[in-house]
Image: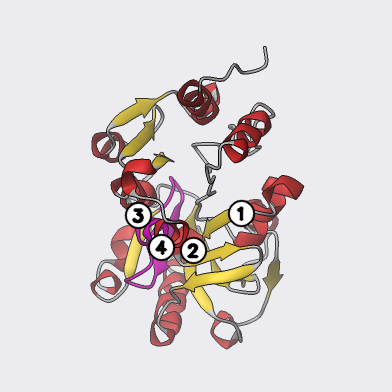
């Protein structure tokens, strides 16, 4: 979604909706896949998104018609380990925050406006709590935000944790700590099995490292022109950037339909 379908302001392009209607007319499933929260994705897609299958929280939560199709929770023993690691980074002067991503809501300890703005952008249901380790919810992942370059600074601090769980860079400022089984690619394969769709019947779009597994699950793997270099190298095709409406333009060209002027 971010960096792919959504425009640089984080909005679904108006030109997408007639393309979605054509996909539905032809019996082609459209599946939003994102590191975002399910509630946030439903809000973005509005009434037109009621019948879609959603791959949320970077593959750790898959939902259709409000029904949970699969979850891959973060192992409970790792939750306090990751929370303490982020607290230690902050105490050492790192400008970092985290969202504990539960099945019901997202939870934050850091409540200043600067961090909360970034958190609310991806989490429609967000609660501030005193202690993340005391939250009573199914923990799907912990998303860590670094106001600097997360790939250069925060991600290396989780190298030892990555021996037990999945640590994926999901954006310039975000990393996600998840179950070792959680991945957009694994989730997409489950959706394919449920819908009776093969990889040869699947087109996927991605721009960042958390999309790599999903691209592997689709014969028509498309990296956005603005994608991370490793993602571009992984995909079979490169399509226009999200700032140039690349997903919608590619889908329209594939379907042979004209976009509104």
Is residue 185 something that shows in the picture?
yes
- Of the numbered discs 2 and 3, the one sitting upstream in the chain is 2
Query: Can you say whether 51 is above or below 242 in the image?
Result: below
What's the mark number on residue 153? Answer: 3
Residue 132, given in percent of the width and then of the height, sits at 57, 80
The answer for how far apart the CA atoms under marks 1 and 3 are is 22 Å
The answer for how far apart the CA atoms under marks 4 and 1 are is 24 Å
State left or right for residue 199 relative to residue 133: left
What's the mark number on residue 143? Answer: 2
Secondary structure of residue under mark 4: helix
Between 15 and 93, which is closer to the camera in this rendering? Answer: 15
Between 252 and 118, which is closer to the camera in this rendering? Answer: 252
Question: What residue is disc 4 on?
Answer: 190
Question: What residue is disc 1 on?
Answer: 122
- Of the numbered discs 1 and 3, the one sitting upstream in the chain is 1
Q: Nearer the viewer, mark 4 or mark 2?
A: 4
Q: Residue at x 53, y 24 (%)?
A: 252
Provide the residue span drawn in magenta. Answer: 170-189
Q: Residue at x 61, y 40 (%)?
A: 24
Q: Is residue 180 magenta?
A: yes
The answer for how far apart the CA atoms under marks 3 and 4 are is 34 Å
What's the mark number on residue 26? Answer: none
Quadrant location of the C terminus in the rendered image:
top right
- Of the numbered discs 3 and 4, the one sitting upstream in the chain is 3
Residue 142, given in percent of the width and then of the height, sits at 48, 69
The answer for how far apart the CA atoms under marks 2 and 3 are is 15 Å
Q: Nearer the viewer, mark 1 or mark 3?
A: 1
Secondary structure of residue under mark 1: helix
Q: Residues within 10 Å of mark 2 (few under 14, many from 20)?
A: many
Task: Give yes or no for contact between labels 4 and 2 (Cβ–Cβ under 8 Å).
Answer: no
Residue 258, given in percent of the width and then of the height, sits at 59, 16
Q: Residue at x 65, y 51 (%)?
A: 121
């Amino acid at each position: 979604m971010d960096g792919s379908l959504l425009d640089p302001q984080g909005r679904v392009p108006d030109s997408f909706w007639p393309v979605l209607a054509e996909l539905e007319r032809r019996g082609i499933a459209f599946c939003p896949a994102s590191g975002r929260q399910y509630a946030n994705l439903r809000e973005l897609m509005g009434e037109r998104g009621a019948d879609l299958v959603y791959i949320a929280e970077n593959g750790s939560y898959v939902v259709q018609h409000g029904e949970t199709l699969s979850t891959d929770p973060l192992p409970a023993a790792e939750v306090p380990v990751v929370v303490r690691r982020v607290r230690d980074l902050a105490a050492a002067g790192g400008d970092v925050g985290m969202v504990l991503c539960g099945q019901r809501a997202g939870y934050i300890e850091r409540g200043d406006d600067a961090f909360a703005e970034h958190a609310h952008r991806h989490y429609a249901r967000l609660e501030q709590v005193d202690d993340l380790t005391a939250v009573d919810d199914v923990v799907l992942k912990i998303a860590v935000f670094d106001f600097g370059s997360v790939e250069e600074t925060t991600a290396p601090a989780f190298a030892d944790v990555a021996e037990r769980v999945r640590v994926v860079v999901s954006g310039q400022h975000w990393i996600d700590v998840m179950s070792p089984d959680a991945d957009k690619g694994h989730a997409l394969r489950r959706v394919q099995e449920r819908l009776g769709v093969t990889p040869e019947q699947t087109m996927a779009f991605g721009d960042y490292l958390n999309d790599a597994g999903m691209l592997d699950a689709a014969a028509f793997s498309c990296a956005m022109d603005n994608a991370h270099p490793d993602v571009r190298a992984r995909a079979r095709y490169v399509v226009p950037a999200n700032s140039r409406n690349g997903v919608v333009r590619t889908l329209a060209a594939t379907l042979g339909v004209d976009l509104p002027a």
